[in-house]
Amino acid sequence: MSSSLLWAVDIFGRVYTLPTVGQYWELCKDTQLEFKRVSAVKQCCWGIGCDHQVYTYVFSGDVPIRYQEETYENQRWNPVGGFCEKLLPSDRWQWSDVSGLKHQQLDSFTLPSPHWEWESDWYVDENIGGEPTEKGGWTYAIDFPSTYTKDKKWNSCVRRRRWIRYRRYKSRDVWAKVVSHDDQDRLSDPFNDISIGGWEITDEPPGRLSVWAVSLQGRVWYRENVCHHNPEGSTWSLISTPGEVAQISCGPYDLLWATLWEGQAIVREGIDRNNPQGVSWSTVESPGSENGIMHISVGVDVVWCVTKDRKVWFRRGVNSHNPCGTSWIEMVGEMMMVNVGLNNQVWGIGCDDRTIYFRQGVTPSELSGKMWKAIVCGRESDRSQTGSSTSLLSAGCFFTDDIQNQTNAIIQGDADTSSDTELSSIPTNFSSTPPMLAAASSTGSQAAAAPVNVTVDPLDSDTEAAAASAHNEKAHLESRKSTNPNPSAELQWTNIDLKEAHRHAVLSIGTFAETSSLSSLGMFSVGAEEQYGADEHALWAWVSGGGCLVDLHSPLKWFAVPSGLSSSVQSLSLSITPAQTAAWRKQIFQQLSERTKRELENFRHYEQAVEQSVWVKTGMLQWWRNWKPHKWMDVRVALEQFTGSDGMRDSILFIYYMYHEEKKYIHVFLNEVTIIAEVLKEGKHSFALYTPERTKQRWPICLAATTEQEMHDWLSLLTMSCCESRRIQGPPSHQAIWSVSCKGDIFVSEPSPELEAGPQPMPCDQMFWRQVGGHLRLVECNNRGIVWGIGYDHTVWVYTGGYGGGFIQGLASSADNIYTQSDVKCVYIYENQRWNPVTGYSSRGLPTDRYMWSDASGLQECTKANTKPPSPQWSWVSDWYIDFSTSGGTDREGWQYAADFPASYHGHKTMKDFVRRRRWARKCKIVTNGPWLEVPPVTLWDISIIPSSDADDEESVALWAISDKGDVLCRLGVTQQNPAGTSWLHVGTDQPFISISVGAFFQVWAVARDGSAFYRGSVSPKKPAGDCWYHIPSPQKQKLKQVSVGRTSVFVLDKNGNLWYRQGITPSYPQGSAWDHVSNNIRKMSVGPLDQVWVIADKVQGSHGLSCGTVCHRTGVQPMEPKGLAWDYGIGGGWEHITVRGNASEAPRSSAPSASESPTEPTGSEGSGRKGKTERSRTPLLVSERQEVDRNAVNC
Amino acid sequence: MTDDKDVLRDVWFGRIPTCFTLYQDEITEREAEPYYLLLPRISYLTLVTDKVKKHFQKVMRQEEVNEIWFEYEGTPLKWHYPIGLLFDLHASNTALPWSITVHFKNFPEKDLLHCHSKDVIEAHFMACIKEADALKHKSQVINEMQKKDHKQLWMGLQNDKFEQFWAINRKLMEYPPEDSGFRYIPFRIYQATTERPFIQKLFRPIASGGQLHTLGDLLKDVCPSAITPEGGDLRFFMHCMDISVCSH
C-alpha cells in the first residue's frame, strides 16, 4: 500500500484512490458501500456513507493497533490465611485501577466496538519498573496506597499485582461503521459532512486526529479521543454554532472553517493543543453578497472556497494568528468543490466536466498556485490485465520477485501484440473496459448504441468481476435479453446509462449545493442516450487530498492518458531499469574489455599519441588559519595531479597563504587524506580535510567556499582524487564500516584485514572514509551487503548497491541505483524569560542574561526571523511551533522553569524559580539523492541485521526493528537479492521498546523504554520471531538505552553513558549471568561479527548541547578477553553512529604468538604503561581536552 | 550510462595501435622508418599526429613538405571523423596494427577538408558539440556555459584528460528529472558501403505514447531495410561494439 493516496468518490458513490506514484484510480478494496463524502489523512480515511452513517477506513499495516487494558488485584495479609482476598472495609476493592479508586473486575472489561478482538486472555504482568518480580508478579507495601516494592518484608501487609490483556483493532482495510453507544437519541439527526485533520496540533496521544462532522440539521459534532490506538474515537460532542452549518473543513493544524446555509463562513478560534475543539466562532462574509459560500476547504494556512455560482476564491492573509484572513481573491475556473491537502496542495472538481483538477505550482511562496490541470488517469478496472504498474513504480519494489515475473509477462505480451493480429487483443479489452471499448472499437459502440431502458442499482455492478470474465459482444447482448441478466453484461449498460442520469441529476439540482442532496445518487431512473456511450471519463463527486503528499521533485504521472497499449509498453520501459540495465552494462563492459584486449594487449609498448601532463585546478577559498587568533583568511588553493610511475594518479593540494607579509604554503598529499567532510562552521560553506596526523591533533584543515556550489565542486573533485589515489572505486564492499555524522552525512570505510588484527591492529585514525549520498540518522548493515538506514523523520531506507550521489555527481557516482532521498528534522530555538516583581515573567532580562531568543546554550542569539535552515539544501516545511516534548517536561504553554540560567529545567513553576524558557521548533526538509530506496510504510526507531558468517545466498536474513512507536518487528523475506524484504511480522511486547540487536546465532536482545533488557527465546530460521521474551535485570540503578550483540558478546549501554559487557553467556544459558562495566562516556556502540567493539564516545562534560562524538575502537578484544583493553581513537568529533556489523573478515594470523603477550599501545589511547587488566578496562574514556578542538569538528 | 565511470573510461581510453609509413612516392633524403603510435579512438587524426609529422619531416626536404594527409588502402582518411570511426569504418577486419600511409603531396581536395591548424579542429569539434546540444537541450546547456568551460572541454580532448573533459561534458549529458530524456538524441549512422556521408534524423528518446525508445527502434526508424531479415548480414558498430545483438 502506497503511503500517499488521493481519495475520490465518483457520482455513483464508489470510492477510488490514486497513488501519487501511480497512473490508475484503484477502486477501494471494500466495495460494499456507496459514499457521499470522504476525508482522508495519511493513515486513515473517514467517510459519510449513503446511509448517512460515519465510517472509518484504517489502512492495514504490519504493526497491529493494540490497546492494553489493565487492572490490579489487591490482597491483604491476615494472620489466619496469610495474603488473601479478604480486605478491610476501608480498603480498596479487590479488583481496582492503579489508584484504587475505581472498581474494575476482569469481566467488567468489554470490547468497545465490534471492530475489536481480544488478543489473549488476562495474564499477570511480572515486570515492575524495568525489573522482574518473583512469584506471580506481586508487589508489596505496608498499606494502601503506598510505595510498592518487589521484595516481601516483615511489615508487608498488603500486596497487589497487575493484570493485563491486549485488545486489537481488527477492522483494517475495510470501512468500519463508527458505532455510537450512548448518544443514539442525540444523533437521530443523520450526518451529512465530515472533515478530519488537526494531527499537527499535538502528538499526544500518538496519531491524534480532529474529526469534525456536520449533521443534516446543520449541527457540528466533534469526535472525542480519536488517536492511533483508538481509531474510532469514543463519543460525539456537540459544538454550538451561530447558525446552521452546511459543510466543514479542518486543516492539518489549527485552521477550521465551516460554511453556513446562509452563505457565510465561520472560523473556529482558540484551537490549540490544550483545547483542540477551539473556543469560539467568528464570521467571514462571502466574497459577493448575491452568491454565498457553498463549499470551503482549508490547509495549514490557506483557505479556498467555492461560491454558489461555482466561482473559486482564495483567502488572502490567513495564518495561525489571524485564522480569518483578510480578503478574497477570485481564481480562474468553475468548480463543484475544492479540497486542500498536504502541503497546501489543492484539488478541485470541474463544474462542467466533473473532472478532478490538480492545482499546479502551489509552493510556499505562491500558495495560490498557477493553473488547474486535469487528472486524466484511467480507472484500474479500465485496464487490461497486464499487472499493476503502480506496484512497479512504488519505491522498494524493484527487488521483489514479482518484478521478475512481471517483466517476463510483459515481454511476452509485447511479443503477442506484435505477432498476432489486432483481433485477438480486442476481447480482452472488451470485457475489462466497457466504456473504453465504445470508443475503441466500432463493434463496441454499436452495442452501446442499442436502445435500452434498464433501472439498475450501482451496488450490483462489480467492476472487478466484470473485468475478470471475458465475454464477447454477442454474449453480452444475449445475456442482456435474458430475464436474469448476467452481472457482467449488465455492467456495460450500468456505467453508460448512469452517467447520463447523473448529468440530469446535476443539472436539476441547479444552484442548490451538492450537500443538500439527500437522495442516493444511484436511485435515479435511467434513460439511455447513445451519445454518452462514448464518454470514457469518470465523473467525480468528491475528492480529498489530505493523505496525498505531492513531492515537487518527483513529477506526477496523472496528466497523460495511459492507453491500453502504451501502458504495457510503459511497464516495459520501466522494467528495463534494474535487471536488464545491469545485464546490458555487463555486456557493454565486456565488449569494451574485449576491444581493449584485442587492440591493446600486444601493443602496450607503443608510444602514446598524447603525453600526460599535470593538470591543476586552482581557486580562491578561505582557510581557518592555524595560528591565533584563529580566523578565516583568503587563500589560493591549487590541486595538482600527476601520474605516478605505476600509472596511477596522485594529487597534492596546495594552500598558499600570507604570514606576516611572507608568502607561505601548506600542502596535503591526497593519498594521505582520511576524510573530507562538510562542516558547518560559522554559517560558511566549509569543509574539513583530515589526515591521520590531523585526526590525532583534532585539528583538520578547514576550507570555506563562497557558494555551496563551489564547495560541492571542490568536495566532489577532492573526494574523487582521494578515491583514485587509494584505488577505491565502485560500491562499498560487504565488509564496509558505515558511519553517520551528526549532520546526517553518511560515510563508508573499507576495513583493511589488519583493522581487527589482535595485538597490532591498524590504528583507526588511518581509516579512509568516503561519503555516500543521502541524509540519515543511522545505518545498519551485515556482512552480506544488506544495508538499511533510518532518517531523522524515521523513514526507512534500503541500500540499493550504488555509490556516490549527493554532491558526488557524475563520475564518482554510479548511474543506477541513485534515487531521490529526503529527510525532515527540526531546528530548535529557545525563548528565555526572567521574572521580575513588577511585570512577572517578561522578555526583559538582566544585562548579564543570555539573549531572550537563543540557542540551547544561550550563547548564540537565535530569533525566529534570523534563524535559517542548516544549509541552503534545507528548506522550511513548517512554521515555528512550541515544542512540548522537551526533556524535563513543560507546563501547558510549553515553559520550563529554573532558578537561574543555565540550570536544570523542570516543567512546573516553584517559588524558587526566577527564569523560564521554552523551546520552539521548526521543521525543515532536505531533498538530496543517494543509493537508497524507501521501504514504506512503517517508520522505525532502531534496526538490526544478523551478521551471518556463511549462509547461502538464497536464505533469508534475520532483520529485527523497533518502530518509532516502540513495536518490535521482524522483517520477512530479506535476502541478498531482495534486501528490502517482503513484510513485517509484529512481535508482541508488554511495553514499548527502544533498541534491538540480533547476534550471529539468532540471539535477539532488546531494550525496553523503561530501561530494562530482554532476551528473545528460540529464534531460529524456522521460527523467525522466536517464542517469548525473557526479562534480564539491568545493571544496578541503571536504565539501559542500547544493546548490541556480536558473535557471542552482548554489550549494553545505559543512559549515563556506561558500557557493560554481559558475562556468563553460554550456548545452554544464552541470557548470561551478570553485567560487567567496561567504560564510561559512551554514546553509541556497535559490536561486530568478530565480537569487535566500536563506539561513538561522548564528549567531555561541559560542552553541553553539542551532542557529537568520536569514533573509537576497542583494542585487545580476544576470545579470552572479550571486553578488550583500551581505546583507539578515530575520526570525530561530530559522529553520531557507526556500524561494524559488516566486517566479518578475520585478521590474518601472521603475527608471532609472542606478540600477543605484549600488546602495543595504540597511538592516541590514554594508557601510559601496562596495568592490571581490570584496572585498564575500567579506565574512563578520555576525549579531547581542549575546547578549541571541538570547534573544527562537524557541528550539528 | 553517462555516469558509469568504468564504461566511460574504457570508451575514453580506447586506443588503436597504428603503424604510419610514408607513401612510397614521397621524396626523402634517407629511408623513412615506420612510426608506431597508440591513437586515441575518440580524438582526431590531425590532432594527435604531431609526432608522426615531426618524424617524417626529419627525413624530407623542407620544400617537399606540404599539408599532411593520411590514407588507408587507397582511401583518404577524413580527419574530421573520429579516429575510432575511421578504423571501424575502413579497417575493422584488418590485422593490427593499423597501417596508415602518410602523404605530404597531392592533397585530395575533393575528399578531404584542409586542416591548417588546430583551431580548425577545435572549431569543428565545438560545432559538433553545439549541434548535439541543440538537439539535446535546444542549446540551453552549451549556451549557459562560460567560454572557459568550452575551452576546458576542448583542452580535455586535446590533452587526453578524461576528468577534465568529463567535468564539463557531464553537464551536457544531463537532463532535468522532470524530462525523461533528451529532446532529441544526437546520432549519426555511418555506412561503410555507401557514398552517403551519414544518416542523421530527428529522433526523440520517448515515443508519443510515453515509452522509451531503444536503439532498435532508432535503427528501425532510420534504416528499416537493415532490420528486416534480408538485412541480417548488416552489422552495427558503436565504439567498435557489435550492437546488432542489442538492438532487438
Image: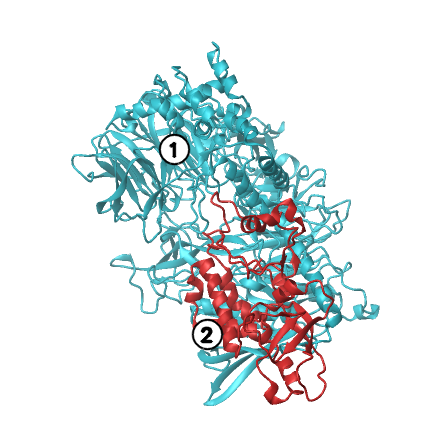
Chain colours: A cyan, B red
Q: Residue A224 carries which label?
A: 1
Dot 2: element = helix
**Would residue B32 appear left or right of A616 to someone viewing this image?**
right
Dot 1: element = loop
Question: Which is nearer the eye, A615 or A829?
Answer: A615
**Would residue A74 appear left or right of A209 to someone viewing this image?**
right
Q: In this view, does A156 lie above or below A15?
A: below
Mark 2 — residue?
B148
Q: Which mark is residue A472?
A: none
State which chain disc 1 sits on.
Answer: A
Residue at 42 percent across and 45 percent down: it is A550
- Where residue A526 appears, as percent x and y from the top left, is 35, 18
Q: Residues within 10 Å of mark 1 (few under 14, many from 20)?
A: many
Residue A1054 figure quarter: bottom right
Question: Which is nearer the eye, A1128 or B97?
Answer: B97
Question: Which is nearer the eye, A454 or A829?
Answer: A454
Amino acid carrying label 2: it is Lys
Can the viewer see residue A889?
Answer: yes
Can the viewer see residue A129?
Answer: no
Q: Residues within 10 Å of mark 2 (few under 14, many from 20)?
A: few
